[in-house]
Image: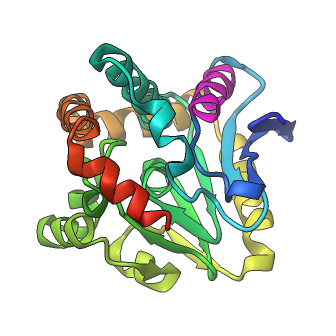
């Protein structure tokens, strides 16, 4: 199965996570395919805006813990794997084209981080999110250590990441994590319509709005990701982490 699907319509490229049987949980192959899909979208002149969504019942349920043992290896290999994950954020946040998120069902861990990365994240009423990483002995990625405080505030960010508080779409809107919340049956039409509005704008000026605002507001994104990568790499080799991950899956 192809883990990421792409479709271009009316200047909008839809990028769909396609592991519905696993709630689009993140696997090494999905990260490779998603980087390729986003890279192609960013380089394609016919693509004026991007809709980022998940197939099936959820946006993305986070790291596929079935693959945890396979993800462990020598330190350089683990670090390279985490950098590929961070490259997804680089493309979404620092790429030229505006990304409209269509978030339904679970957005967990790395999936929640990707939702936060989107320029205009639209959540369905069914949307649910949380960060499980610290409770598993792991660490967050996706530059959320710098992006989330600007949305939700410093204290709330620490609370969300430390305790893994679960929240619904209405709460995501209050926290600034969601741009807007719509009924589930309207989500994908709303995301497409929003992206088409962006696609109809003057191309260079629309890109400059994202480029200037994101680079001005997120000048520390690369530094944050470097620290996240180091912390996540170290966590992968903590003996307690493996025990917590295995206990989580039972």
User: Residue 173: x, y in percent?
Assistant: 44, 77
* Identity of the residue drawn at 73% across and 70% down: 187
**Image position of 84 with respect to 131: above or below:** above
* Identity of the residue drawn at 47% across and 70% down: 129
As drawn, is 143 to the left or to the right of 56? left
Residue 136 sits inside the magenta stretch: no
User: Residue 240: x, y in percent?
Assistant: 22, 51
* Identity of the residue drawn at 68% across and 20% down: 40
As drawn, is 231 to the left or to the right of 106? left
As drawn, is 225 to the left or to the right of 57? left
Q: Is residue 144 visible?
A: no
What residue span does the magenta drawing correspond to? 28-42
Task: Tell which of 249 and 181 is nearer to you.
Answer: 249
| Residue 151: quadrant of the picture | bottom left
User: Residue 138: x, y in percent?
Assistant: 28, 49
Question: Where does the N terminus fall, quadrant-wise?
Answer: top right
* Identity of the residue drawn at 46% across and 58% down: 112
| Residue 177: quadrant of the picture | bottom left
**Image position of 180 with respect to 49: above or below:** below
Picture colour scheme: rainbow
User: Residue 194: x, y in percent?
Assistant: 68, 57
Dominant SS in magenta:
helix
């Amino acid at each position: 199965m192809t883990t990421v699907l792409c479709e271009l319509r009316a200047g909008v490229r839809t990028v769909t996570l396609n592991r519905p049987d696993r709630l689009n949980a993140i696997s090494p192959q999905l990260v490779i395919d998603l980087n390729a899909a986003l890279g192609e979208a960013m380089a394609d002149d016919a693509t004026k805006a991007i809709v980022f969504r998940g197939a099936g019942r959820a946006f993305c349920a986070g790291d596929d813990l079935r693959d945890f043992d396979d993800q462990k290896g020598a330190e350089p290999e683990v670090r390279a794997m985490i950098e590929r994950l961070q490259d997804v954020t680089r493309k979404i946040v620092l790429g030229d084209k505006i990304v409209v998120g269509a978030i339904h069902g679970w957005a967990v861990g790395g999936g929640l981080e990707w939702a936060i990365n989107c320029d205009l994240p639209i959540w369905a009423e069914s949307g649910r999110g949380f960060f499980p990483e610290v409770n598993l002995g792991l660490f967050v990625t996706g530059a959320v250590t710098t992006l989330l405080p600007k949305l939700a505030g410093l204290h709330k960010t620490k609370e969300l990441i430390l305790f893994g508080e679960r929240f619904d779409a209405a709460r995501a809107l209050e926290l600034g994590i969601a741009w807007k919340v719509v009924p589930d049956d309207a989500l994908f039409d709303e995301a497409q319509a929003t992206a088409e509005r962006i696609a109809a704008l003057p191309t260079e000026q629309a890109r400059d709005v994202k480029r200037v605002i994101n680079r001005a507001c997120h000048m520390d994104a690369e530094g944050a990701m470097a620290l996240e990568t180091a912390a996540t790499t170290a966590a992968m080799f903590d003996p307690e982490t493996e025990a917590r991950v295995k206990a989580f899956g039972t």
